Amino acid sequence: MRIYVCVKHVPDTAANIKIVGDDAYDTQVKYVANPYDEYGVEEAVTLVEKAKEGEVVAVCVGNKGAANTLKSVMAMGVHRSILVKTDDQFPGSDLTAKALAKAITDDGNADLIFMGKQSVDSEGMQTPYRLGMELSLPVVTGVVSFSHEGDTAKVQREIDGGARETLAVKTPCILGATKGLNEPRFPKLPAILKAKKKEIKEVELSSLGLVDQGHCRIKSLEPVQERSNAKILEGSTQEIVAALVKILREEEKVI
Amino acid sequence: MSKIGVFIETVDQEIKQSVFGVISAAASGGEVVGFLLNGQADTYKDQLAAYGVTELVDLAAGDIVFSKFPQAAGEALAKGATDFGVTALVGVSSPTGNDLLARAAMALKAPLALDCIDVDFNDSTVKKSHFSGKAIATLEMTGKLFVCGIRPNSFEAVEAPGTIIVTTHNIDIENSDDIIVTAVEAAGSGKKDLTEATVIISGGRPMASSENFKILDDCAEKLVAVVGASRAAVDAGFAPHSMQVGQTGKIVSPKLYIGCGLSGSVQHFAGMKTSKVIVAINTDKDAPIFSKSDYGIIGDLFEVVPALTKELEKQE
């Protein structure tokens, strides 16, 4: 069994993002493995551990620093990695999917492919679908439960209002993981040290001869103005709630 | 005049409330063509005509039940978009909406943007969150047509009554059994979806138990609100994941968001900062939430929330 996991190297969600120029950001921030991808990594590693055979290969499209993200998922149990290198801050979903597809097909046959349902930087939510198109494989995203038997995966995804949809998916397939699928492990020191010795194969994106056909480009990137300090309502609890209701009803007109 | 296609998403045989805002957004770009996947156009036509849908299309593909075959459903939307000559296909960025719009975009080989908070059909641009709501990107889409999912409550639904033509459009799809929906398990609560709510009242870890959420339920009833929770409250087992607002939960955009006992983490704000008005209730005057809300109440939620419920009751 060989499982591929696609991993993105992204700024930590707690990082302070400073916009530079019209469409770029200051990359001097802490980077991590995309949190949604970690659910995919955990699921893949657990499957191989339980099967007592097979390997998990991480594939990432990112800059040089992405090697650290790959080390972090190898510390979680991924066996080896492929890094498709690019300096582009926002490689489009289409080009990313093409690069992931090329890296995977050049490497071997996938029994399953896991990834996060979205990244936390560009929040595109579409790379799994684009990868599915490149590889002609079925795709389901927002996966919160997974099991498989023979050539069929049984997955669940959360739909409106907490309802759950159960789907039967022919394997190999691409699954976009989300919170609820599992609890990603925190690697211990021996695993972290062992990961340093695992293989990261590097490929230059520009050497693959791929063309972005996503037809979508970032025109501008603007910081979101945070609200300034809240207006603190004062008085007795009774006075405060009366004032709040009045404000919400008469000034803000939201109730 | 150009035509904009709207996926009319339905839940339990009713049009999803946030579809109407999407229709109003689409109307700014041209004539609105509604696409339905459940063959019920006659049931909905008056409701949709009232918001400016001029053409309503029941998509049909032989005996394929679209709710069971998401791949066929996405392909049907794509064929509808092509056959009716729309310049954009839009819908609600809900779990189902996102899935089918993405499948349609793949079939169309069209650019796609999901969870958009604004769309301009004249210059084919959309605005959407980047970096957990810390930045807004303006994306430009090129090509004959683009596909776009819109975050619920991003556009006000505006009535625009007119006439509507209803048609059934038969398409040829080679069905695949690669993906089959085998069951749908309803949520226990039967509550309205958080993303659809115009008012939300959320509880954090200080709620201390699932039983205590009753004080939020009582207040929500008076506010016509839906109850949410923070990740801390969900992880502590006080509320189900379906109630979680934030980065790894629901992205919401209500008119009013009342946070009770929330610290105000970046990850929580990623899920609700586009709310129109944010009210924070917390005992800690230094809680970060007070620096990014509109109104703050420094006090114990167990006193303030019941008092608020009483005040609303009094004014009924």
Image (cartoon, coloured by chain):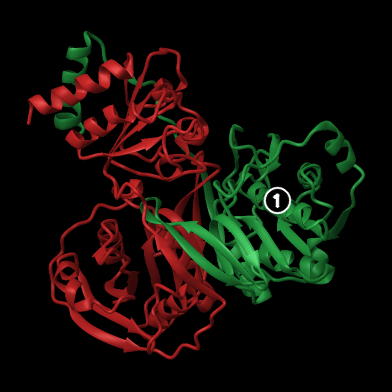
Chain colours: A green, B red
User: In which quadrant is the C terminus of chain A drawn?
Assistant: top left
User: In which quadrant is the N terminus of chain A drawn?
Assistant: bottom right
Give coordinates of residue B67: x percent, y percent.
39, 72
Residue B106 horizontal side relative to residue B158, left or right: right
Q: Nearer the viewer, residue B210 or A119?
A: B210
Give coordinates of residue B43: x percent, y percent.
18, 74
Give coordinates of residue B183: x percent, y percent.
43, 66
Q: Nearer the viewer, residue A135 or B158?
A: A135
Query: Residue at 78% across / 62% down in the picture?
Result: A205
Residue B37 horizontal side relative to residue A29, left or right: left
Residue type at tag 1: Val
Could you say whether the residue bearing mark 1 is in a helix, strand or loop?
helix
Figure check: B285 above or below A51: above
Figure check: B58 above or below A110: below
Residue A190 horizontal side relative to residue B145, left or right: right
Can residue A233 be seen by looking at this rendering? yes
Query: Residue at 37% across / 52% down in the picture?
Result: B187
Give coordinates of residue B97: x percent, y percent.
41, 63
User: Which picture quadrant has residue B309?
Assistant: top left
Figure check: A244 above or below B76: above
Query: Residue at 25% across / 60% down in the picture?
Result: B20
The chain ID associated with circle 1 is A
Figure check: B143 above or below B140: below
Q: Which residue is mark 1?
A: A41
Direction right: furthest residue? A197
User: Which picture quadrant has residue A2?
Assistant: bottom right
Q: Residues within 10 Å of mark 1 (few under 14, many from 20)?
A: many
Can residue A8 be seen by looking at this rendering? no
Q: Nearer the viewer, residue B95 or A131?
A: B95
